[in-house]
Amino acid sequence: MAEAAAEKLVCVTGAGGFIGSWLVKELLQRGYVVRGTARHPEDPKNAHLLALDGAQERLSLYHADVLDYMSLRRAFSLCDGVFHVASPVSNDPDLVPVAIEGTKNVLNAAADMGVQRVVFTSSYGAVHMNPNRDPDRTVDESCWSDLEFCKQTQNWYCYAKMVAEKTAMEEASKRGIQLLIVVPPGTIGRMLQPTLNLSLSIVATYMKGTKKAYSNAVGAYVDVRDVALAHILVYEDVSTHGRYLCIGHMLHQSEFLQMMRDLFPQYPITTKCKDENKPLIKPYKFSTQRLNALGMKFTTLKESLYNTVVSLQENGHIPVLLHKSSL
Ligand SMILES: NC(=O)c1ccc[n+]([C@@H]2O[C@H](COP(=O)([O-])OP(=O)(O)OC[C@H]3O[C@@H](n4cnc5c(N)ncnc54)[C@H](OP(=O)(O)O)[C@@H]3O)[C@@H](O)[C@H]2O)c1
């Protein structure tokens, strides 16, 4: 059962980022009054937010750092809900405490200010990094990464997201907050923000030919608009609880790059696998039944990939190369 959006005040942390910007856009479109946080709201990199439909009337930008408790309390004051999207997206071990402490601060500041529902943006990195998972098992919300394995492989981003997610659960349960968790994998699609985030920069390196070989690995992907919508679906339905996997597609890197080459044959996208002599890793089965039950329909990978590349071109992150047949 969905709640009406009109006049509801919600806050989005990390509003100027790739996912945050789309979430702000979709919330404004549904009639919410939105506060977006950024560490430097006046930075030109956040100007696109104020140009969104409805922003003049219903968007305000607040300064907040997830390590500055008082800044979070100010941003959350009077809010019905908080979408905690902000996090360092980095493999730098020094930033691990920012993700974890930041999440603890967000949950507690939200509770202090009487916020009832918090949606936390987790990551597929908190789900699949487990070498002991049976490869035939369907990946669903009950799967967790193995923290020791993340440490051993120095995958600090996945480590941080998993501990942050667990921290969010603990704090929400202590403080009586209803917590909903959206778990997206590699997120692609059209960018609204002018700066390049990590997931799109990976696509850009393939398009530019700077990446000379791909891993024998399986990747999971979703469109950024679907991720934004998933946040709203889990927030609005009062019967929701816990984790929601938000995965559109799962395929081998070779298939992903083949799709890129089919769409944009004029770009120097590598055809070389890093370990060509080994059999290709098979994609896992996965379930998004929980999100599907809320009405989620995923964008096709072809459409997401096309929009990603056009958006990278439009924002000057990759050169515009013309296909011979279109000359
Ligand atoms: N993109 C993906 O493939 C993907 C997949 C799964 C999960 N996620 C999760 O989705 C969220 C957003 O990712 P994204 O791809 O949209 O990345 P992004 O564009 O780099 O956005 C990250 C946001 O976090 C904010 N942030 C970083 N450190 C902060 C701090 N100390 N205090 C306050 N804000 C801080 C940044 O704000 P400033 O403007 O202030 O720098 C920025 O708005 C993250 O939680 C990420 O883990 C992303």
Image (spheres, rainbow, N blue to C red):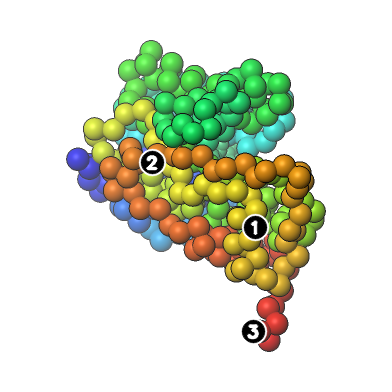
Q: Residue at x 69, y 78 (%)?
A: 322
Against 170, residue 284 (above or below) is: below
Mark 3 residue CB less than 8 A from any atom of ligand 1: no
Residue 97: give x, y in percent of width and height.
63, 22
> Is residue 62 visible in this depiction of the protein?
no
Disc 2/disc 3 C-alpha distance (Å): 39 Å
20, 36: nearer the viewer: 20
Query: Image point 60% across, 55% down: which residue?
Result: 256
Where in the figure is residue 261, as x and y percent of width and height?
65, 65
Residue 280, position in %: x, y? 65, 45
The mark that comes first in sequence, 1 or 2, is 1
**Res 140 → quadrant:** top left
Q: Quadrant of the rendered structure where residue 118 is?
A: top left
Q: Which type of secondary structure does the marked residue at label 3 adopt?
A: helix
Q: Residue furthest top?
A: 174
Give the spatial CA distance, label 3 vs label 1. Answer: 21 Å
Q: Amino acid at mark 3?
A: Ser
**In the image, which disc is placed on residue 257?**
1
Marks 3, 1: nearer the viewer = 1
Indicate the secondary structure of the residue bearing disc 1.
Answer: helix
